Amino acid sequence: MLPVLVVHGGAGTIPKDRVEMSCAGVRAAARAGYAVLQRGRSMDAVVEAVTHMENNPAFNAGCGSVLNVKGEVEMDAIVMDGKTLASGAVSAVRNIANPAQLARLVMDKTSHLCLTAEGANQFARAMGVPEVPGESLITDYARMRWQLNLAPGANPVECQMGKMGTVGAVAVDADGNVACATSTGGILNKMEGRVGDTACIGCGGYADNRAGAVSPTGHGEAIMKVTLARLILFHMEQGLSSAEGSDLGLATMKERVGGALGGVVTVDPQGGWAARFTTNQMVWAAAQGDTLHYGLRPDEVLTQSLAPE
Ligand code: ASP
């Protein structure tokens, strides 16, 4: 069994001028997470990879998050450990640079699974997690999109469904332990207080050593209706491969709730992996052995050596 780490930087169509930064961003995050995976645990590796992407303004997570209807950043994040089924999440949290790390603290330091809004911020303060000015998480690009979508005549469906940009990672380590982490600013111009799939166990992430681990991206409300991460693992429990289970879960989401915007990265405990999506694009990268695989369009798989760039 070869340890593997797979990341995504969101499903949806990426504007041409942002393709290169998104592709470079997932490759760098996969390398960073894989360096941790080679020394240790899948949980540490997925949090490292997601932290990397939260710190990269190319993505809709941490700095670079999309804005809610009031022009503010509210973020959701989740982590899950496949060995113990321990999980932690935060929803609608503000002023935190790395929500996935805060979700991990919820898992490690509380008896709860999810803390929300001001309660999550109070917990962050108690844990000594520094708060950052809301403005420091807002990019010019995010503000421009928010304003465009407030304009009279803007099509809110189109604007919410364009580029998603959530980030996520799944991994299996040398001991066969799987883990997942997902982090997002949610969907563009969402209502204040909206909680998406990313904070909800079984929807925006699930990990179980008996089946595998999944981190989804896409239209959160559709993902939640079919509990996408758990649905895919159910299919894998029935004998499907990570790619087959992912495709079937995404197809079910399309068919049952019209959720045509979805993507996932998936691993199984044997080191099998998949990056699948129903959108035109999903930027992803997978590190295994001495090879980095990556892609953007359906069925595109490029490779490079994992030797330092
Ligand atoms: N799933 C996220 C949400 O609905 C959006 C995304 O994947 O980019 O909050």
Image (spheres, rainbow, N blue to C red):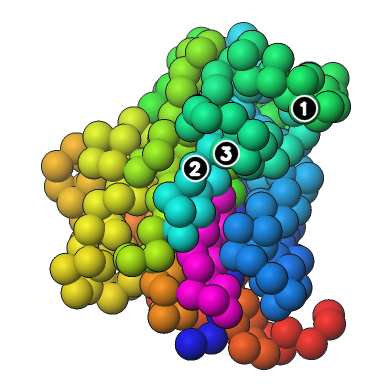
* Front residue (pair 106, 229): 106
Query: Magenta segment, principal secondary structure?
Result: strand
Residue 206 against residue 74 in the figure, above or below: below
Q: Quadrant of residue 20?
A: bottom right
Pointer 3 with pointer 2, Cβ within 8 A: yes
Using the numbered discs, state the Cα–Cα distance from disc 3 to disc 2 in whole angstroms: 5 Å
Residue 6 against residue 161 in the figure, above or below: below
In the rendered image, is residue 229 in sight? yes
Secondary structure under tag 3 reads: helix
Using the numbered discs, state the Cα–Cα distance from disc 1 to disc 2 in whole angstroms: 18 Å
Mark 3 neighbour class, 10 Å CA radius: few under 14, some 14 to 19, many 20 or more: many
The amino acid sitting under disc 2 is Ser
Disc sitting over residue 107 in the figure: 3
The amino acid sitting under disc 1 is Met
Secondary structure under tag 1 reads: loop
Q: Quadrant of residue 98?
A: top right
Pointer 1 with pointer 2, Cβ within 8 A: no
Where's residue 233, x and y in %?
29, 59
Residue highlighted by disc 1: 127
Mark 2 neighbour class, 10 Å CA radius: few under 14, some 14 to 19, many 20 or more: many
The amino acid sitting under disc 3 is Met
Q: Quadrant of residue 69?
A: top right
Where's residue 301, x and y in %?
51, 80
Q: Residue at left 49%, top 42%?
A: 87
